[in-house]
Amino acid sequence: MRVRLEDVARATGVSPKTVSRVLNEEPSVKESTRQRVLAAMEQMNYRPSPAARGLAGSRSFLVAMLYDNNDNPASTYLAEIQDGVLEACNANRYSMMVCPLRTRVQDFIRRVDALVADHHIDGVIVTPPLTDNAALLRRLNEHGVPHASISPLRRDETIGVRMDEQQAAKAMVGELVRLGHRRIAHILGIADHGASRWRLAGYKDALAEAGLPFNPDYVVQGQFTFGSGVLAARELFSRPILPTAIFAANDDMAAGVMWAANERGLKVPRDLSVCGFDDTPLATQLWPPLTTVRQPSREMGKLATEQLMEVLRGRGEGLLLQVPFTLQMRESTGAPPSDAT
Amino acid sequence: MRVRLEDVARATGVSPKTVSRVLNEEPSVKESTRQRVLAAMEQMNYRPSPAARGLAGSRSFLVAMLYDNNDNPASTYLAEIQDGVLEACNANRYSMMVCPLRTRVQDFIRRVDALVADHHIDGVIVTPPLTDNAALLRRLNEHGVPHASISPLRRDETIGVRMDEQQAAKAMVGELVRLGHRRIAHILGIADHGASRWRLAGYKDALAEAGLPFNPDYVVQGQFTFGSGVLAARELFSRPILPTAIFAANDDMAAGVMWAANERGLKVPRDLSVCGFDDTPLATQLWPPLTTVRQPSREMGKLATEQLMEVLRGRGEGLLLQVPFTLQMRESTGAPPSDAT
DNA sequence: GTGAAAGCGCTAACAC
DNA sequence: GTGTTAGCGCTTTCAC
């Protein structure tokens, strides 16, 4: 039937336990034995049974990727992250489960309990905006389940990966300034998300650095959705003096701005410059193509998972890595209209 | 520590085996015993260990969702399907793994072998275009792994879910005819995908029904991507007599067409009507919003999984269900230009 | 309709 | 550095 650990042991002339040691990369095995066992495994096409390993040992070799199913980030963003997480999991011989969480439902924490109880999850990857959900993080800690975060708000006591979004936003708005814009508006994301805070902070930084005043009339609330971008833009278009550029906190809202601009007969970028954040596929599917900040989501998923693996394999504490951003200057931004005051 | 099956047995005053029977919904248990056991489980918050069940029994209670990582369908499409699959899995107390397959890599079949060998997958959900991958299906059959397909090309010997895409395409093009269009072009998807065939067939059907000639010059190859839509549209725009409407085989390509139209100074829908297929979020994020065919992807994922469950739970053979389509008429389509010949 | 015994394939704890 | 023994929590026979 199936090739078992015992079979490998017999073929190699060692005890099952030694084969187990090799399988689990325990250091206390003589190199020559290790090689012989490894060769036998390979030759016999040995496949350890996850069920048996899970039952006997404490570990399940399972990682869960948690995401928010209410305040859903763009599915493309999550898909990219998922891809990266999966790659890192496979490389470490771990399996991945995806686990949507409805944070608005009262007992969503129960779902977490169930996840841990049912599957003995070894570790968790937390994606925004769950990264900032105190109740969730507390529960994970209570369960003693290690977790790595992607773009967490807090930088202390957290491992995973982040990007300097504030710096990125500042750079983006700085480019608008460089193009000659002086009336630059901002559309906020969902209020308590880290992404919204950082991007607003970066916007303010850039204005300050350029010596431009911060005008509250030019900052309106959005919800990260296309529709909210449309509404926010309409609101901005109702101001007595129009902004010449709009920096939306993500691409979906920027797309909404472009939609609203079209509706109002404003030509982008001639009458209005528009830029976003994230560089989703949508950015190059708009006309004109959207200037935005590129975030290496796939890579971030992978890196966060690798940090989690450091912990799971007992190799260390894991770090909060930082990845670089890139400004994607495209055709949705240009010089302000010449008649702009 | 942990509540085990044995504990439940003791608390109920029956043997472990009986509790096991209840757990596995075996019919041969007296209803009153069943209720008592169930109550005890609930009261003691009993959680069966998947590892132990997997080890002792043959089943893993794991379903893998396979998708093509080369000819990647829109990630939003897959995300929706994944959501539906997950919902059905949870409802049946199954777990789901996602499993990208690089079909272009020579030994991608090995990945399937590994999946089955490593995790003892109980069943598989196959998404397009893998649904038509003969090598994959053969291998799954060799392994004896039940699978359900989403939008398979072949309708025999397959369970899962489909939509009458040909009928949908026909209806969509029929609408263009109704609007007055007589020069209707079509952009094909990737050659051997079922979706491409059906949508082309429906296009032809509609022309035939309207008594319009089939003009090969008005049918150009695309690859389901935004970029290929742009190229295809440029090709169509090079024809001596322009089409007044373009039916693209999916939304991404339709977005490409609108991009190209913009580039060429054609106003949609005044100069050109454009429609797509799938109703991805992109459709409502374009200007003007895209007319398209709505496909209930999430529901399809759920239904396909439910059919797979029928098989896994030994309740039957499973069916190939059919779901209805909906035409989403939006602003990217309208009457042809009055000066159209 | 229900139960007793054996064992799924692996690892823990301990010994040597 | 390596082996022995016991047992993880469940399901499978097979018995009654």
Image (cartoon, coloured by chain):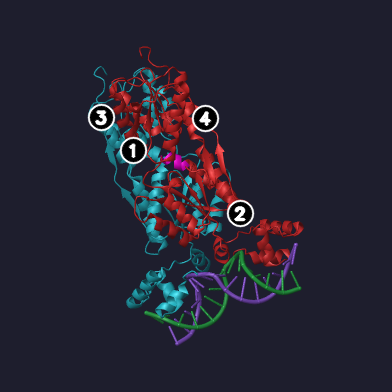
Chain colours: A cyan, B red, C purple, D green
Q: Position of residue B258 (x, y in %)?
A: 35, 26
Q: Which of A150 and B339 is in front in this view?
A: B339
Residue type at numbered disc 1: Asp
Q: Give the range drawn in magenta.
A: B74-79
Q: Mark 3 lies on which chain?
A: A
Q: Which amino acid does label 4 sit on?
A: Thr
Residue A107: x, y in percent? 58, 47
| Residue at (44, 46) in percent of width and height | B132
Q: Marks 1 and 3, Cα distance to the nearest angstrom?
A: 21 Å
The residue indicated by pointer 3 is: A177
Contact (CB < 8 A) between labels 4 and 2? no
State the residue position of label 1: A279
Residue at the image position 62 percent from the left and 63 percent from the top: B3
In primary-sequence order, the first of circles 4 and 2 is: 2
Looking at the rendered structure, the number of numbered marks drawn on it comes to 4
For mark 1, give the secondary structure.
Answer: loop
Question: Which residue matches tag 4?
Answer: B326
Label 1 and label 2: CA atoms lie apart by 44 Å
Look at the picture and state if B191 lies above or below B115: above
